[in-house]
Image (cartoon, rainbow, N blue to C red):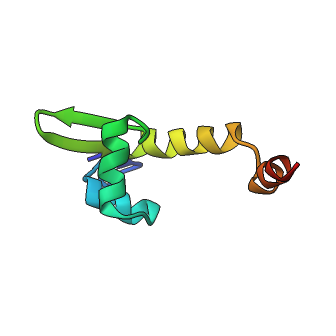
Amino acid sequence: MPTKGNYVSEEPEFLTIPETARLLRINRGRAYAMAGEGTLPGVVRLGRTIRVNRAELIAGLIKSAQNSEPTSLRLQNHLR
């Protein structure tokens, strides 16, 4: 487990797909699909087991959000 200061963090470094789905507030099936498509950041495969690195997931989501245009701009461009 990761340590912070002189205590052990309560949050696991690696998440299961159901934990990831709850964190992202998406359907578990969608999370499995995203992992299979390669669109879910931080996915690690260990044989048939899938885990998601929490730090890589969060960093990937932040990067993705910074690279995308705001929804209102996409809608404006779509309506033109």
Q: Is residue 78 above or below residue 36?
A: below
Please state the horizontal and vertical placement of residue 45, each as a whole percent of the image. Answer: 21, 34
Image point (83%, 50%), residue name: 73
Residue found 84% across the figure and 53% down from its top: 79
Which x, y percent locates residue 12?
29, 53
State whether residue 20 is above or below residue 66.
below
Residue at x 54% of width, y 45% of height: 61
Any part of residue 13 in sight: no
Number of disc labels: 0
Q: Picture coordinates of residue 75 (x, y %)?
A: 79, 54
Residue 50 figure quarter: top left
The image position of residue 48, as x and y in percent, is 11, 39
**Residue furthest to the front:** 80
Left or right of 12 in this view: 57: right
Query: Is residue 61 left or right of 13 when viewed as pictured?
Result: right
Q: Nearer the viewer, residue 77 or 70?
A: 77
Residue at 36 percent across and 55 percent down: it is 30
